[in-house]
Amino acid sequence: MLRFDVMTLFPEMVKAPLSESIIGRAQKAEKLKVVCHNIRDYSKDRHHRVDDTPYGGGKGMLMMPDPVYDCFCAIPKEGERRRVIYLSPKGKVLTQKKARSLATFDQIILLCGHYEGIDQRVLDEIVEEELSIGDYVLTGGELAATVVIDAVGRLIDGVLPDPICHEEESLSSGLLEYPQYTRPVEWHGVRVPEVLQGGNHQKIRAWRDEKAVELTVKNRPDLLSDKGES
Ligand code: ADE
């Protein structure tokens, strides 16, 4: 079972969304485990402080190395294949390919930063890789860690109802997914494309491929030039 350990100052930001829906069910079914650790519990300060001003000046506060390190040391080891990841806009951007590779680990430890960041020395000592979830800046790593757990967790065997879904979905093929329709056959004056109503699977396949390419050219032409990256 893949175990995620999340080191954070705001455990509820991670726990709450992952207790719902598919990942919530998967946790109950013990297909994966998410354990949150509050970094503040490891502060030795009388006031439970975890941040301080940066050397050299500058705005904001930095997370001090000791509470982060002590929190890390308290996490029990699970299995052989472990990864320690710091969520940061400075990291490599998460892709579907990366999610597939992370799904093969036994334990993934996710470190969430807040304020203006974390003292570099503790990052250098414990972190193996930095991951970003996109080119924008969040207020902290919690939402990013949640995204990583959701994207990786759904790839674990038995988490999604039908594993064939992985083959068909957006990005796995390097293309965006074709549009889909359900009943009623006519809605707001728009009919479901005729080809999908017939049983000609070859024609349906061709129609879906064509739509997938069309959509990818329109919304994500970058995917067509870096095939394999998804
Ligand atoms: N922390 C702040 N912004 C982030 C991002 N885009 N990805 C991962 N962690 C972050």
Image (spheres, helix red, strand yellow):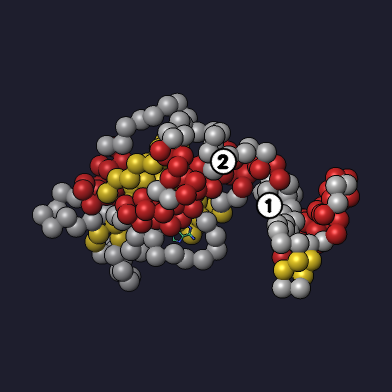
Amino acid type shown at disc 1:
Ser
Q: Determine whether, in the image, residue 79 is placed left or right of residue 200.
A: left
Taking 8 as reference, is 191 left or right?
Answer: right
Q: In the rendered view, would you say 135 is above or below 18? A: below
* Residue 117 in sight in this render: no
Numbered label tally:
2
Q: Is residue 90 left or right of residue 95?
A: left
Q: Which residue is mark 2?
A: 160
Dot in front, 2 or 1: 2
> Which circle's residue, 2 or 1, is located before the other in the chain?
2
Q: Amino acid at mark 2?
A: Leu
The secondary element bearing badge 1 is classed as: loop
Regarding residue 96, the answer to whether it shows in the image is: yes
User: What residue appears at the point 61 percent right and 47 percent down from the top-left corner?
Assistant: 96
Within 10 angstroms of label 1, few (less than 14), some, or many (20 or more) residues? some
Residue lying furthest bottom: 189
Few, some or many residues within 10 Å of mark 2 (<14, 14–19, 20+): some
- Disc number for residue 68: none
Element type where label 2 sits in the image: loop
Q: Is residue 48 above or below residue 129?
A: below
Distance from mark 1 CB to nearest ligand 1 atom below 8 Å: no
Identify which residue is drawn at 27% across, 49% down: 38
Q: Position of residue 228 (x, y in %)?
A: 71, 46
Q: Which residue is mark 1?
A: 170
Which image quarter: residue 197? bottom right
Image location of residue 118, percent across then percent down: 34, 55
| Residue at 42% from the left image edge and 39% from the top image edge | 27
| Residue 10 location (% of width, % of height) | 31, 56
Quadrant into which the N terminus falls? top left
Q: x, y percentage for residue 42?
A: 21, 46
